[in-house]
Image (cartoon, helix red, strand yellow):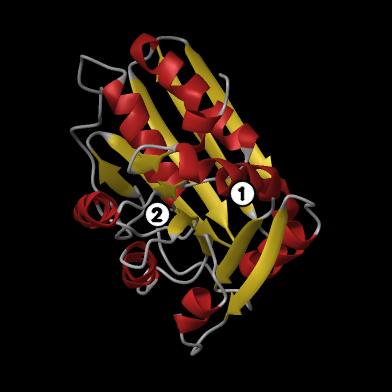
Amino acid sequence: MTTRVGVIGASGKMGTEVCRAVEADDDLELVARAGRGDSLDMLVDSGAEVAVEFSTPSTVKDNAAFCLTRGINVVIGTTGLTSSDLDELRELTRQYDARCFVAPNFAVGAVLMMRFAAQAAPHFDSVEIIERHEKQKLDAPSGTSLRTAGLINEARTEPWDVPTSGKETVEGARGGDVDGVRIHSLRTSGSVAHQEVIFGSVAQTLSIRHDSLDRSSFMPGVILAIKRVGTLDELTVGLEALLDL
């Protein structure tokens, strides 16, 4: 039997790629394409079992809530959800017996980059993250960089060695601070998704970098999430939960 899939944000760059990947998979059936301004009722009317959410940070929570309250499992690739948003969605999964999977990044290489960074974190004194995406990306910093900062901070017991002197002659030059981890967000034409984590200690540095050169790099992870979301418990965050790492 095939799984019936609806895509929210189907007319966007990622949504278009997801539709193509779903149509190419024999185990999946694309039954709804919801673009900007379309009613999500089409997901219900088409009998979608899983909704893939790739809309915008301002609409993702409401779209996911719509699906969960109607018993439709949700796979979310849109970034911008806060901890409070995740808590609300988790509660909805409990109330309506639906499942929700959220991934800041669906590329296997990006998941490994985050895993390696967490392993390195206890062994260095300082760290900074440089992330680069297309200029149309609506949020900064990226969900991947925030997830990376969270994971490497969880892996440490000591605070980072951060500069205590000096000043910015241009505001924002030092990036944003996430509990001692500086994140620098670049938005440039021609980019897809790129991130480098740079660690430093006495007389050495370590750089861990991942580059997605095309949106097709995310599709194996998206397809895996669609097929597995129904087997998960309530709300799950991170592609690593689905991989044998």
Dot 1 lies on which element?
helix
Question: Identity of the amino acid at label 1?
Answer: Val
Query: Which sits in the foreground, 243 or 2?
Result: 2
Residue at 70% x, 62% y is 29
Q: Position of residue 53 (x, y in %)?
A: 49, 64
Which quarter of the picture shows residue 215?
bottom right
Real-space Cα separation, disc 2 to disc 1, in angstroms: 22 Å
Query: Which sits in the foreground, 16 or 119?
Result: 16
196 with respect to 163 (left or right): right
Toward the bottom, the furthest residue is 37
Q: Which residue is mark 2?
A: 141
Q: Position of residue 50 (x, y in %)?
A: 52, 59
Dot 2 lies on which element?
loop
Q: Which residue is mark 1?
A: 222
Q: What is the crowding at mark 1: few (fewer than 14 residues within 10 Å), some, or many (at least 20)?
A: many
Q: In this rendering, does residue 190 appear at all?
A: no
Q: What is the crowding at mark 2: few (fewer than 14 residues within 10 Å), some, or many (at least 20)?
A: many
215 with respect to 163 (left or right): right
Query: Which sits in the foreground, 73 or 35?
Result: 73
Quadrant, the C terminus: top right
Pick whichever of labels 2 and 1 is earlier in the sequence: 2
Residue at 33% x, 17% y is 125
Residue at 34% x, 44% y is 235
